[in-house]
């Protein structure tokens, strides 16, 4: 009987080590991912041109800028004469690079910020879960002490 009891203690000890090791791993990974997320946000702040890759990918996938440009051009050509519209369109093509507002660029900023928030939220969840797993044994012991204390006080009444 004494041998069986020590086997259960060893099992609990091994499981406790595994749980704490997993918690420590989650905690460290969450901290690293959180720090990398903060670093990336600061790099985007220092160099906003890095968002351009997302803008190009969004434009390739959706052609939103081309669609809005063609929609604007068709509304301008429908309003004037054919001769006037063609000369206006030629003049607009020469100034388009400097005055166009690219919707894909602004959309890419929204997507990048949402991705950073999502990654930061996942990192925080990993940190919280890892911390809880590392401190699991202490929480269980504290709960056991509270239960013993309450059961002792309830039997006195």
Image (cartoon, rainbow, N blue to C red):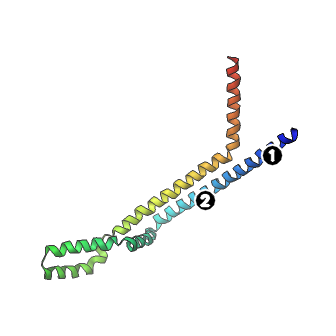
Q: Is residue 24 above or below residue 154?
A: below
Tell me where residue 26 appears, x and y as whole percent: 64, 54
Q: Earlier in the sequence, mark 2 or mark 1?
A: 1
Q: Nearer the viewer, mark 2 or mark 1?
A: 1
In the image, taking residue 126 as reference, residue 138 lies left or right, namely: right
Report the Cα–Cα distance between label 2 and label 1: 33 Å
Tell me where residue 43 appears, x and y as whole percent: 50, 65
* Labelled disc at residue 142: none
Q: Residue lying furthest left in this view?
A: 81
In the image, taking residue 98 as reference, residue 40 lies left or right, namely: right
Q: Quadrant of residue 74?
A: bottom left
Q: Which residue is mark 2?
A: 32
> Which residue lies at the image location 37% right of the left edge and 65% below the top edge?
106
Q: Is residue 116 above or below residue 80?
A: above
Element type where label 2 sits in the image:
helix
Q: Residue lying furthest top in this view?
A: 157
* Labelled disc at residue 10: 1
Q: Quadrant of residue 109?
A: bottom left
Name the quadrant of the C terminus: top right
| Residue placed most toward the observer, 7 or 153 | 7
Is there CB contact under 8 Å for labels 2 and 1? no
| Residue placed most toward the observer, 7 or 48 | 7
Q: Is residue 40 above or below residue 5?
A: below
């Amino acid at each position: 009987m004494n041998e069986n009891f020590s086997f259960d203690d060893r099992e609990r000890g091994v499981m406790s080590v595994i749980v704490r090791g997993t918690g420590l791993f989650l905690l460290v990974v969450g901290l690293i991912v959180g720090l990398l997320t903060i670093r990336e946000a600061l790099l985007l702040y220092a160099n906003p041109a890095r968002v351009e890759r997302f803008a190009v990918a969004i434009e390739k996938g959706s052609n939103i800028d081309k669609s809005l440009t063609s929609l604007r051009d068709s509304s301008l050509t429908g309003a004037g004469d054919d001769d006037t519209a063609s000369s206006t369109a030629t003049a607009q093509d020469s100034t388009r690079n400097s005055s166009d507002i690219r919707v894909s660029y602004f959309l890419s900023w929204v997507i990048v910020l949402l991705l950073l928030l999502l990654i930061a939220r996942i990192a925080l969840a990993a940190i919280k879960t890892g911390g809880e797993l590392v401190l699991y044994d202490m929480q269980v012991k504290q709960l056991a002490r509270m239960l013993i204390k309450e059961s002792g006080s309830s039997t006195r009444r």
